[in-house]
Image: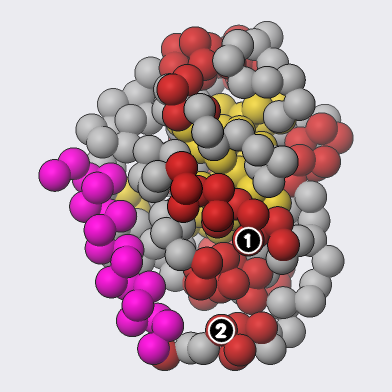
Protein backbone atom coordinates (compact mmCIF):
# COMPACT_ATOMS: atom_id res chain seq x y z
CA UNK A 1 0.00 0.00 0.00
CA UNK A 2 1.40 3.44 -0.94
CA UNK A 3 1.51 6.28 1.60
CA UNK A 4 -1.49 8.15 0.14
CA UNK A 5 -3.70 5.06 0.28
CA UNK A 6 -2.52 4.44 3.84
CA UNK A 7 -3.39 7.99 4.88
CA UNK A 8 -6.82 7.86 3.24
CA UNK A 9 -7.62 4.53 4.87
CA UNK A 10 -6.69 5.83 8.31
CA UNK A 11 -8.65 9.04 7.74
CA UNK A 12 -12.00 7.24 7.72
CA UNK A 13 -11.36 5.85 11.20
CA UNK A 14 -10.10 9.19 12.44
CA UNK A 15 -13.22 11.00 11.23
CA UNK A 16 -15.50 8.40 12.83
CA UNK A 17 -13.82 8.99 16.19
CA UNK A 18 -14.20 12.76 15.92
CA UNK A 19 -17.86 12.43 15.00
CA UNK A 20 -18.40 10.60 18.27
CA UNK A 21 -16.84 13.48 20.21
CA UNK A 22 -18.38 16.51 18.48
CA UNK A 23 -21.75 16.58 16.77
CA UNK A 24 -22.46 18.44 13.55
CA UNK A 25 -24.88 20.62 15.54
CA UNK A 26 -22.03 21.62 17.83
CA UNK A 27 -19.86 22.51 14.84
CA UNK A 28 -22.61 24.66 13.39
CA UNK A 29 -22.82 26.59 16.69
CA UNK A 30 -19.20 27.67 16.43
CA UNK A 31 -18.75 31.48 16.43
CA UNK A 32 -16.62 31.11 13.30
CA UNK A 33 -19.28 29.20 11.39
CA UNK A 34 -21.16 32.32 10.31
CA UNK A 35 -18.14 34.47 9.44
CA UNK A 36 -17.81 35.88 5.93
CA UNK A 37 -15.44 33.84 3.78
CA UNK A 38 -12.33 35.53 2.40
CA UNK A 39 -11.89 34.50 -1.23
CA UNK A 40 -8.61 32.78 -2.08
CA UNK A 41 -9.37 33.04 -5.79
CA UNK A 42 -9.79 36.80 -5.58
CA UNK A 43 -6.75 37.23 -3.34
CA UNK A 44 -4.58 35.40 -5.89
CA UNK A 45 -5.91 37.52 -8.74
CA UNK A 46 -5.24 40.69 -6.74
CA UNK A 47 -1.84 39.67 -5.38
CA UNK A 48 1.16 41.88 -6.10
CA UNK A 49 3.57 39.14 -5.00
CA UNK A 50 2.88 36.33 -7.50
CA UNK A 51 0.18 34.78 -5.31
CA UNK A 52 2.28 32.99 -2.73
CA UNK A 53 0.23 30.68 -0.48
CA UNK A 54 2.53 30.06 2.47
CA UNK A 55 2.03 26.82 4.35
CA UNK A 56 2.42 25.92 8.00
CA UNK A 57 3.08 22.28 8.75
CA UNK A 58 4.83 20.61 11.63
CA UNK A 59 6.25 17.57 9.86
CA UNK A 60 5.88 15.38 6.79
CA UNK A 61 6.26 11.64 6.14
CA UNK A 62 9.15 12.30 3.76
CA UNK A 63 11.08 15.07 5.55
CA UNK A 64 10.33 14.47 9.22
CA UNK A 65 9.93 17.23 11.82
CA UNK A 66 10.01 20.89 10.78
CA UNK A 67 8.78 23.05 13.61
CA UNK A 68 11.29 24.86 15.80
CA UNK A 69 10.70 27.39 18.56
CA UNK A 70 8.24 29.63 16.72
CA UNK A 71 4.49 29.18 17.17
CA UNK A 72 1.86 28.82 14.47
CA UNK A 73 0.73 32.35 15.31
CA UNK A 74 4.22 33.80 14.86
CA UNK A 75 4.92 31.93 11.65
CA UNK A 76 1.60 32.64 9.92
CA UNK A 77 1.64 36.30 10.93
CA UNK A 78 5.18 36.53 9.61
CA UNK A 79 4.07 34.99 6.32
CA UNK A 80 1.31 37.55 5.93
CA UNK A 81 3.59 40.47 6.79
CA UNK A 82 6.03 39.19 4.18
CA UNK A 83 3.31 39.48 1.54
CA UNK A 84 1.72 36.03 1.30
CA UNK A 85 -1.63 36.19 -0.48
CA UNK A 86 -3.01 33.29 1.54
CA UNK A 87 -2.20 30.68 4.15
CA UNK A 88 -2.36 26.89 4.17
CA UNK A 89 -2.43 24.94 7.43
CA UNK A 90 -1.92 21.17 7.65
CA UNK A 91 -4.43 19.69 10.11
CA UNK A 92 -3.66 16.00 9.67
CA UNK A 93 -2.28 14.84 13.03
CA UNK A 94 -1.01 11.31 12.43
CA UNK A 95 1.21 11.97 9.41
CA UNK A 96 1.78 15.72 9.53
CA UNK A 97 1.51 16.56 13.23
CA UNK A 98 -1.18 19.19 12.73
CA UNK A 99 -4.45 19.85 14.53
CA UNK A 100 -7.53 21.99 14.16
CA UNK A 101 -6.04 24.14 16.93
CA UNK A 102 -3.37 25.20 14.41
CA UNK A 103 -6.12 26.25 12.01
CA UNK A 104 -7.91 28.29 14.67
CA UNK A 105 -4.66 29.96 15.73
CA UNK A 106 -3.91 30.97 12.15
CA UNK A 107 -7.46 32.28 11.68
CA UNK A 108 -7.47 34.26 14.93
CA UNK A 109 -4.33 36.18 14.04
CA UNK A 110 -4.71 36.69 10.27
CA UNK A 111 -7.24 38.16 7.88
CA UNK A 112 -6.22 36.49 4.64
CA UNK A 113 -7.69 33.41 2.89
CA UNK A 114 -7.04 30.24 4.88
CA UNK A 115 -6.87 26.75 3.41
CA UNK A 116 -7.51 23.74 5.58
CA UNK A 117 -5.10 21.24 4.10
CA UNK A 118 -6.10 17.70 4.94
CA UNK A 119 -7.33 14.54 3.29
CA UNK A 120 -11.05 15.06 2.82
CA UNK A 121 -13.23 11.95 2.75
CA UNK A 122 -16.41 13.09 4.52
CA UNK A 123 -18.76 16.09 4.72
CA UNK A 124 -18.06 16.23 8.45
CA UNK A 125 -14.51 17.44 7.77
CA UNK A 126 -15.90 20.29 5.69
CA UNK A 127 -18.16 21.34 8.56
CA UNK A 128 -15.07 21.21 10.80
CA UNK A 129 -13.19 23.41 8.35
CA UNK A 130 -15.89 26.08 8.39
CA UNK A 131 -16.34 25.86 12.16
CA UNK A 132 -12.62 26.38 12.70
CA UNK A 133 -12.11 29.35 10.41
CA UNK A 134 -11.14 27.95 7.01
CA UNK A 135 -12.13 29.68 3.78
CA UNK A 136 -11.03 26.90 1.41
CA UNK A 137 -10.94 23.11 1.51
CA UNK A 138 -8.66 20.76 -0.41
CA UNK A 139 -9.96 17.88 -2.53
CA UNK A 140 -7.28 15.45 -3.72
CA UNK A 141 -8.26 13.66 -6.92
CA UNK A 142 -5.72 10.88 -6.37
CA UNK A 143 -7.19 10.09 -2.96
CA UNK A 144 -10.92 9.73 -3.56
CA UNK A 145 -13.17 8.75 -6.44
CA UNK A 146 -14.96 11.21 -8.71
CA UNK A 147 -18.41 10.63 -7.19
CA UNK A 148 -17.22 11.42 -3.67
CA UNK A 149 -15.09 14.35 -4.81
CA UNK A 150 -18.00 16.00 -6.61
CA UNK A 151 -20.28 15.40 -3.65
CA UNK A 152 -17.82 17.02 -1.25
CA UNK A 153 -17.22 19.96 -3.60
CA UNK A 154 -20.95 20.62 -3.88
CA UNK A 155 -21.37 20.41 -0.11
CA UNK A 156 -18.47 22.82 0.49
CA UNK A 157 -19.97 25.34 -1.91
CA UNK A 158 -23.35 25.02 -0.18
CA UNK A 159 -21.61 26.24 2.98
CA UNK A 160 -20.03 29.16 1.16
CA UNK A 161 -16.52 27.72 1.19
CA UNK A 162 -14.17 27.74 -1.78
CA UNK A 163 -12.73 24.54 -3.19
CA UNK A 164 -9.24 23.63 -4.35
CA UNK A 165 -9.06 20.58 -6.60
CA UNK A 166 -5.61 19.00 -6.49
CA UNK A 167 -4.42 16.89 -9.38
CA UNK A 168 -1.15 15.20 -10.25
CA UNK A 169 -1.82 14.41 -13.92
CA UNK A 170 -4.23 15.55 -16.62
CA UNK A 171 -6.28 12.34 -16.38
CA UNK A 172 -7.37 13.37 -12.88
CA UNK A 173 -9.17 16.38 -14.34
CA UNK A 174 -11.70 14.10 -16.06
CA UNK A 175 -15.01 14.15 -14.21
CA UNK A 176 -13.69 16.33 -11.37
CA UNK A 177 -14.05 19.79 -12.94
CA UNK A 178 -17.41 21.39 -12.23
CA UNK A 179 -19.14 24.60 -11.17
CA UNK A 180 -18.25 23.62 -7.59
CA UNK A 181 -14.49 23.96 -8.13
CA UNK A 182 -12.85 27.38 -7.70
CA UNK A 183 -9.14 26.67 -8.04
CA UNK A 184 -7.19 23.82 -9.64
CA UNK A 185 -3.84 22.97 -8.09
CA UNK A 186 -1.21 20.80 -9.73
CA UNK A 187 0.89 18.97 -7.16
CA UNK A 188 4.46 18.54 -8.32
CA UNK A 189 4.95 15.96 -5.59
CA UNK A 190 3.66 12.46 -6.20
CA UNK A 191 1.83 11.59 -2.97
CA UNK A 192 2.39 7.90 -3.63
CA UNK A 193 6.19 8.03 -3.56
CA UNK A 194 6.95 11.73 -2.75
CA UNK A 195 9.05 12.31 -5.86
CA UNK A 196 8.97 15.93 -7.08
CA UNK A 197 8.98 17.19 -10.67
CA UNK A 198 8.11 20.81 -11.56
CA UNK A 199 7.44 19.74 -15.15
CA UNK A 200 4.22 18.13 -13.94
CA UNK A 201 2.69 21.60 -13.57
CA UNK A 202 3.95 22.72 -16.95
CA UNK A 203 2.68 19.61 -18.73
CA UNK A 204 -0.74 19.73 -17.05
CA UNK A 205 -1.39 23.47 -17.40
CA UNK A 206 -2.67 23.35 -20.98
CA UNK A 207 -5.36 20.81 -20.06
CA UNK A 208 -6.94 23.00 -17.34
CA UNK A 209 -9.82 25.05 -18.83
CA UNK A 210 -9.33 28.80 -18.73
CA UNK A 211 -12.21 29.49 -16.34
CA UNK A 212 -10.35 27.76 -13.52
CA UNK A 213 -7.59 29.65 -11.71
CA UNK A 214 -4.42 27.55 -11.68
CA UNK A 215 -1.91 27.15 -8.86
CA UNK A 216 1.24 25.04 -8.61
CA UNK A 217 2.00 23.14 -5.42
CA UNK A 218 5.12 21.66 -3.84
CA UNK A 219 8.77 21.58 -4.83
CA UNK A 220 8.98 25.30 -5.55
CA UNK A 221 12.21 26.64 -4.10
CA UNK A 222 13.50 29.49 -6.30
CA UNK A 223 12.06 32.70 -7.79
CA UNK A 224 13.12 31.44 -11.22
CA UNK A 225 10.61 28.58 -10.92
CA UNK A 226 7.84 31.04 -10.00
CA UNK A 227 8.57 33.12 -13.09
CA UNK A 228 8.71 30.00 -15.25
CA UNK A 229 5.36 28.71 -13.99
CA UNK A 230 3.77 32.17 -14.28
CA UNK A 231 4.54 31.96 -17.98
CA UNK A 232 2.31 28.90 -18.17
CA UNK A 233 -0.68 30.69 -16.62
CA UNK A 234 -0.25 29.85 -12.94
CA UNK A 235 -1.56 32.58 -10.62
CA UNK A 236 -0.74 30.99 -7.27
CA UNK A 237 2.09 29.00 -5.72
CA UNK A 238 1.68 26.90 -2.60
CA UNK A 239 4.96 26.73 -0.70
CA UNK A 240 5.59 24.94 2.58
CA UNK A 241 8.82 23.03 2.94
CA UNK A 242 10.85 25.77 1.23
CA UNK A 243 10.09 27.90 4.30
CA UNK A 244 9.36 25.39 7.08
CA UNK A 245 12.55 23.36 6.77
CA UNK A 246 14.71 26.46 7.28
CA UNK A 247 15.85 27.75 10.67
CA UNK A 248 13.70 30.88 10.29
CA UNK A 249 10.56 30.34 8.16
CA UNK A 250 9.54 34.00 8.53
CA UNK A 251 12.83 35.34 7.23
CA UNK A 252 12.87 32.76 4.43
CA UNK A 253 9.40 33.76 3.27
CA UNK A 254 10.22 37.47 3.45
CA UNK A 255 13.45 37.03 1.52
CA UNK A 256 11.79 34.87 -1.12
CA UNK A 257 8.91 37.25 -1.78
CA UNK A 258 11.26 40.25 -1.86
CA UNK A 259 13.38 38.49 -4.47
CA UNK A 260 10.37 38.15 -6.75
Vertical relation: 75 (above or below) 28: above
Disc 2 designates what residue? 24
Res. 235 image quadrant = top right
x and y percentages locating residue 107 in the rendered image:
68, 67
The disc label shown at residue 114, or none: none
Asked if residue 19 lies left or right of residue 17, the reply is right
Residue 107 part of the magenta-drawn span: no
x and y percentages locating residue 132 in the rendered image:
62, 73
Prevailing secondary structure of the magenta residues = helix
Q: Residue at x 42, y 59 (%)?
A: 121
Q: Residue at x 30, y 55 (%)?
A: 8
Magenta residues (range): 1-20
Which quarter of the rendering shows the N terminus?
top left
Disc 1 designates what residue? 155
Residue 2 part of the magenta-drawn span: yes
Asked which secondary structure carries label 1, the reply is helix
Asked if residue 119 lies left or right of residue 183, the reply is left
Q: Tell me if I can see residue 148 in this picture.
A: yes
Q: Nearer the viewer, residue 49 or 93?
A: 93
Asked which secondary structure carries label 2, the reply is helix
Q: Tell me if I can see residue 253 in this picture.
A: no
Amino acid sequence: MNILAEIIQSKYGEVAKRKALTTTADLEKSPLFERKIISLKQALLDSKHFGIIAEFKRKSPSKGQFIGQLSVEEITQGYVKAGAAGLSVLTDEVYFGGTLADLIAARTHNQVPLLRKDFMVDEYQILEAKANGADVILLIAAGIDTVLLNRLAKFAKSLGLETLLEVREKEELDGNLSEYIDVVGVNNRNLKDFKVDINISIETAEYIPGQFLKISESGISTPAVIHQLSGHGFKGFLMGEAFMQTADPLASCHSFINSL
